[in-house]
Image (cartoon, rainbow, N blue to C red):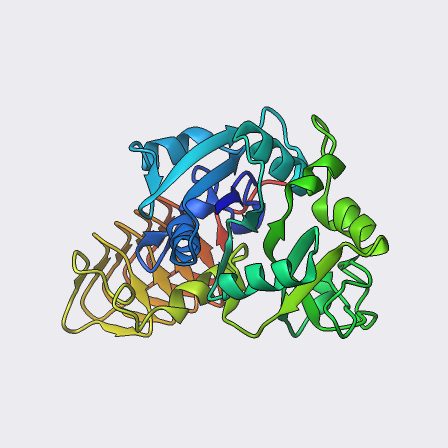
Amino acid sequence: MRAVVLVGGFGTRLRPLTDATPKQLLPVAHRPMIEHSVGHLAHHGVTEVVLSMGFQPDAFKAAYPDGTCAGVPVCYAVELEPLDTAGAIGFAAREAGIDGTFLACNGDVLTDLDVDALIERHRTTSAAATIALTPVDHPDRYGVVPTDDNGRVLSFVEKPSVGEAPTNLVNAGTYVFEPSVLDRIPAGRPTSVEREIFPAMAADGTLFAMASDDYWVDAGTPASYLAANLHLVDHPEGGTHPEARVDPTARVCRSVIGPGAVVAPGASVDASLVLEGATIRENARVEGSIIGPKANIAAGASVTGLSVVGPGTTVESGERLDGIRRPEPEG
């Protein structure tokens, strides 16, 4: 089966980390986020991936010059202007000549979803499309999807008001589509799958869903991106990279330390992500935060409270950052 993976967004919620890097190329436990997503799809039988791109498409082509990602052949569909979610899916599927049942997913979602079970549910219901659902604590932040006892979607409510969600099951960003769904997506104009296509399909009874409590995270915010890394901290791929240098007198607790990073004598890093080539100098403290590539946390500085320090940025000696992004994202 083939899959369309959406990687065209600007990653604004992760700035300044994404000022020059698409978010799907940010590392999660030392591997680009997109490789986790594509590798998971490959585990469930996907044989080719179409990357639907907009922002910095050349970065993906440079990252995978041999045309494979996580061992899976990839092809590229580059939007000339943003087409929103459904528009991007339709554009990529048409560009790739997809004419059979296919998967689509958001490239910033990391999950252990049983994709085989989702495909089987799709086939047994003869649905035109089937959505994976996941339970969350704050459904008002997502597309909420109430269903009947057979899994037929009754409605699709995108980001309802606080306290008004009809269920805590939300759109998990992985879909199975029949090619007939492409007929619903107009070519050449922005179209939302969440606000236009899915509500229309729910209304005519052709949209089904499967709920699961498998691991799932939308890694598009600093909090969730950090959580995705810390989820794998005890995995063989996580923790401290072999090419990092951590002084024996430094304290590193439940953190991911990237290749070439340096943690100097007396420094402490707790529940944090320190990316490639960053330096945590003597007696500096990093807690619950993200330090970008080649950033420099000077001696005695403190970075806490989900602060995000951008690539190549210096936090001066003695400075205290708590819940701060540096540099502050524009707009």
Q: Position of residue 101 (x, y in %)?
A: 58, 46
- Which corner quadrant holds the C terminus? top right
**Residue 89 place in picture, x, y as percent:** 61, 39
Which residue reaches farthest left? Answer: 248
Height in image: 51 above or below 293? above
Residue 217 shows up from this direction: yes
- Which residue shows up at 75% across the image and 38% down it? 184
Choose between 314 and 237: the one closer to the eye.
237
Q: In which quarter of the image is residue 145?
A: bottom right
Nearer to us in this view, 43 or 174: 43
Q: Nearer the viewer, residue 81 or 211?
A: 211
The x and y percentages for residue 114 are 49, 66
Place of residue 59 in the rendered image (x, y in percent of width and height, measured from the top left): 40, 33
Residue at position x 30%, y 70% in the image? 235
Task: Tell me: residue 235, above or below residue 130.
Answer: below
Q: How many labels does the image show?
A: 0
Residue at screen point 27% across, 63% down: 237
Residue 323 seen from this side: no
Q: Would residue 259 appear left or right of 130 to someone viewing this image?
A: left
Q: Left or right: 248 with respect to 228?
A: left
Judging depth in this view, the residue of 302 and 100 nearest the camera is: 100
* Residue 319, picture quadrant: bottom left
Rendered position, 331 above or below 283: above
Residue drawn at x 25%, y 68% as measured from the top left: 236
